[in-house]
Amino acid sequence: MADRPLDADQVAEAEALAALGRTLASIARSRFDLDEVLQAVVEEAAALCHADSADIAVRDGDVFRMRAFAGFSPEFEALGRGVVYSPDRESVVGRAILEERVVHIEDVLADPGLSAGTIQASIRQAGRIRTDLGVPIRYDGQLIGVIAAARNEVRPFSARELDLVQQFADQSAVAINLARLLAETERQRTELARYAPQAAVLLSSVEGEQLLAGHRREITALFADMRGFTAFAEKADPEEVLGVLRQYHTAVGELAVANAGTVEHFAGDGLMVFFNDPTPIEDHQLAAVRTACAMRDQFAALSVAWLKRGYELGLGIGIATGYATVGRIGFEGRYDYGAVGTCVILASRLSSAAKAGQILISQRVLAVVEEAIESEPVPDLELKGFSSATTAHAVRSVLEPR
């Protein structure tokens, strides 16, 4: 029995699926490069509906920006990348965002809703656009982008061409979202890998995802911040302030990682590191104290050069140990691997109370490391958020093992 010929709808679906297959293949070739995936999408879309040119706008927060182009000049691409799209009636993209449906403008010069003299009119003129088409891309009920296809003469798209590109847009949403997720995961891994390599590894495993979601663990928290930084920042040039911060962050951050610490964040002249998570560390309290002493020594070496330029800067460090809730904190696009708990607050307060060159540790830290360090008590500290006076201990040095 002979195969029955495909009807028009089946042919359209088959062509759209074939185009989608080529787009999905580009993800593997691109190594998670979203721009390369978007480029493949826009080129396939232009070919499917026989457009002279096409571009694709992708959601960026509350607005949409052009990310890939086909059939346009480099000058037009440079112009298009600088334009922000939002729901309006001034462009085919704005209308597609506003109405969340396919928008087909047969002649842009004859459409009464498109104003002359606007930036969008200039873009249409620069792109030699006469017939314009905007096709929304949705994923999981959310609008994530718009494919815009155009012709340089008044030649409306046929019903079949409209159906083809709409089906392709619906199916390509999966490929685009996958590429965005992979790219975001890779970006997070890259950011975490420098100062929190243990946390970066968690992004690619089931067990790691559970740890990222939040868990309880005993940690040792270390806070450090500069003394004299405000006065320095008020009189120094911004470039010099950034240069000092860059030297400081690099030195203390690399020391923290070398001692198996997890750098939660830098905040201006402040730094937070914690130990014993996500990778357990034997004697994590002592590891924190060793790191603090190395930071103090490294900072002292840097401060000699700064002092020659008239900048008197010091470093105060606080360390506390206890149980905390640890996991991924932040929002989509900007995550840290952080810790929340009383020990974190205490370490921060001790850091604020420390004098230049001083390392203050809590009583619980001392109980673990007392035999391995030289220290002296610092009683009656009034720390913000603590109802009674606190006794801390100032570390002079770590004793060498016998």
Image: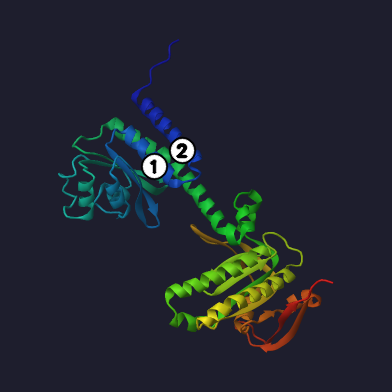
Q: Position of residue 229 (x, y in %)?
A: 52, 80
Badge 2 crowding class, 10 Å Cα cut-off, few under 14, some 14 to 19, many 20 or more, is many
Q: Say which quarter of the image contains residue 251.
A: bottom right
Disc number at residue 353? none
Residue at x 74%, y 71% (from the top left corner): 286
Q: Secondary structure at mark 2?
A: helix
170 sits to left or right of 229:
left
Image quadrant where one finds the C terminus = bottom right
Image quadrant where one finds the N terminus = top left
> Dots 1 and 2: beta carbons under 8 Å?
yes
Residue situated furthest top in the rendering: 1
Q: Say which quarter of the image contains residue 167.
A: top left
Number of disc labels: 2
The image shows residue 78, relative to residue 301, as above or below, that is above
Q: Position of residue 7 (x, y in %)?
A: 35, 22
Q: Say which quarter of the image contains residue 227.
A: bottom right
The image shows residue 138, relative to residue 279, as above or below, that is above
Residue behind mark 1:
39
Is residue 140 shown to the viewer in this render? no
385 sits to left or right of 9:
right
Disc number at residue 26? 2
Q: Secondary structure at mark 1?
A: helix
Q: Amino acid at mark 1?
A: Gln
Q: Pick whichever of labels 1 and 2 is earlier in the sequence.
A: 2
Residue situated furthest right in the rendering: 402
Residue at x 46%, y 41% (from the top left corner): 175
Q: Position of residue 342 (x, y in %)?
A: 65, 74
Out of 388 and 396, give the one closest to the viewer: 396
